[in-house]
Each structure stands twice: as structure tokens, then as C-alpha cells.
Image (spheres, grey):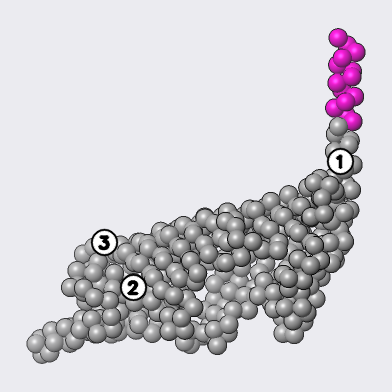
Amino acid sequence: MKKWFIAIGILGFLFIVGYFVLTFYAVKFIQPYVQKAMVHGLTFSETKIGTTHLSLTGIQYEDPHLKQRFLISDEVRIYPSLLSLLTKSLWVKEIAILKPSFFFYRSREGSVVGPLVMATEQGEREGVSEDRKKKEGIQVQIDRIRIEKGSVNFEDQKVAGPPAQFKLRDLNFEMKDIRYPLIPLHSPIELRGKMNGQTREGSIHLKGWIDAKTMNLETSLKMKEIEVKTFEPYYRKRVTAEIESGLINMDSRIAVTEKRIDAPGEVDLIDLRVKKGGGMVFWIPAETLAALLERKGNQVKAKFHMKGDMANPQFNLQETFLTQMGFSFAQALGFPVKVIGEEEFQSIERLFKKKKERKK
């Protein structure tokens, strides 16, 4: 019996040693592929070959044309699969991106600029297309991409007035089952994080799937205790009164199929307070709105349903959402709005003007 235990112990030890040896060679196997995949402007300070993963530290991406930095990260760890040694394809169990910071902005013309966009455009300029990758016979399978403790800084210059600033912190993101060259495939995704406000942090949770080939997706989006004033740059055209405070809880399901969006949901506005005096909020006088909100405990629930073709230049997602919110907001407060449209909202404004004239 003692001999059996010794034999099992030796076999177990050999198995563990063999596993780490093979994993080490799998790490060395993927190293040249990783270096070859580096785009111009993406740099790292050090490469380490571990027993289970390839480590890149001091990651930075600076667009060579704009001379702007769009990404920094403490470390990226790439864990290869042992199957990479047996096949011509590159099989990766996990890519872990630790404490990255992403920087995006939207220009006055409406173009979104960021690390993924710029790297893709650079690949196209250099002729690195999917067809070329297919000819070279490089097939990549990634079981999971994980972002840990990340952050996103987004500046929107397209809004009227000063640019809108959004800061997402403590982001944990996961995407599974990624193939390259891209094929139609539902890749599960999940994101959790916090959004910085003026006085507090709210939370964001997104979960669903995305098809990286067609960009179709189905997700649920939950936002909790996001400050209303965070979105002031977007509603300042339609809200001339001062919103003193308010928190947003939102629950929505978002589906995009062939660039057509279908997103029903509900918004719960908590502790919404409007400064009495001049100005309007979606064509409702601030004084009237403040009185109505007090009766409702400064809380309003409103439903919305956005639909439209995002490929149509005449479709504006921001304006559509604001119109939906104005419609639902007015309905929730008891106004007889039956049709979504500018004329219907302006009729509310005329109604209040007539009331003022009667009082005079």
C-alpha cells in the first residue's frame, strides 16, 4: 500500500511539472505573435515570461498622427492554452488588463476618437485587413478578455457650450468567446462600474451579448443614483430653469440589429428639485413644475421606448431620447400629451401662457 502512495505521489508530481513545462513553452510560443500584433504607437516597458502567462508592463498607446495618449495600463497578462502547441491557431485562455485608463472624445463633427478606433484605422491604413489575416492563416481564439479596476474618461465636444465630461471608475469588464478573423458570434459581455458626479458616485451594470462581426447586440442596462446634473450639457437646450438636485435610476433593455436600435425602459427620478423662478423644463414653467414635484414627493417615474435606424443621418439618438423623456415626463405629471412631437409640447407652453394672461 505504501508503494502505491509513493507511485501516485511521483505521478502527480510529474504531471504538475509537465503541466508547468508545457505551459511555459506555450507562453514562449505566443510571444512572437503578440509582438507582431503590436500597432504603431503601442509601447510597453517590459516583457516577462512566466510559467503560466506572458506579462507586459507599462502599456501605453499614443496615436502617432494626433500625438495624443489614449491608453495607459499597469499590466497586461496573456494566459495561453496548451492547445496552441498542438494546432496552427493561437488559442488564449484569458487576457487580463489590469488598471487601464482609456481616453475617448467626440469631436464637434460627431466622430468618436479613442484607442480602439484609432488602432483600427491605423490597421486599415497599413493594409492589415481581415482578408490578409485569412491568407496568412492566423486564427485566434480568446476564451475571455477581462478588465480589472479600469477607468474611462470621455469628453463630448459636440454638445452646445462647454464639452461634457464623463468619468467612469472601478470598471470591471468581461467578454467571452472572441474569434479572429471575426465571425458572426454571440460573445457574452458584462460591465460593472461607477460614474463620478459632482457630489457622489452612481453605479452602472450592463450585461448581455455582442456580435463583434455585425455589431448586433442585446443587453440590459441598469443605472443607480446617477446625478441628473451630470447630463446637463445634453438637456441645457430644453431646460432653461436651474435643476438644483436629482438622482437617476434607470432600467433598460437595448437591442441593436443591423444598426436599428430598439430600447424600452423606465427612468425613476428621485429627489428632483427645480429652482423656483424663471425658466422652463421641457416647456413647463419652473414654478409650476416645482409645485407639482412637491406634491409627488419630488419623485417621478417615466417610461420610454427608443426606436430608430442609426445608419440614417436624420436619426439623432440624443434628440430622440430627450423627446421621449420630455413626453414621458409630461405624462407622469398629469399633462394631456398623447402624441410625441414638437407641436404637442409647444401646445403645453401655450397653455401656461394663456393661464398667465388670465391672471393678469
Relative horizontal placement of residue 123, taking residue 205 as reference (left or right): right
| Residue stretch rendered in magenta on the structure | 1-14
Q: Residue furthest front?
A: 135
Mark 1 or mark 3: name the one nearer the start of the chain. Answer: 1
Q: Is residue 3 magenta?
A: yes
| Amino acid beneath label 1 | Phe
Quadrant position of the N terminus in the picture? top right
For mark 2, what is the residue?
A: 324
Circle 2: is it few (<14), some (14-19), or many (20+) Cα within 10 Å?
some
Q: Position of residue 7 (x, y in %)?
A: 89, 19
Circle 3: is it few (<14), some (14-19), or many (20+) Cα within 10 Å?
few
Mark 2 or mark 1: name the one nearer the start of the chain. Answer: 1
Residue 306 in view here: yes
Image quarter of residue 19: top right
For mark 1, what is the residue?
A: 20
Q: Is label 3 in a helix, a strand or a loop?
A: loop
Q: CA distance from mark 1 to mark 3?
A: 63 Å
Q: CA distance from mark 2 to mark 1?
A: 57 Å
Q: Which mark is residue 137?
A: none
Foreground pick, 313 / 112:
313
Image quarter of residue 224: bottom left
Image quarter of residue 239: bottom left
Q: Which mark is residue 297?
A: 3
Q: Residue furthest top?
A: 1
- Front position among marks 2 and 3: 2
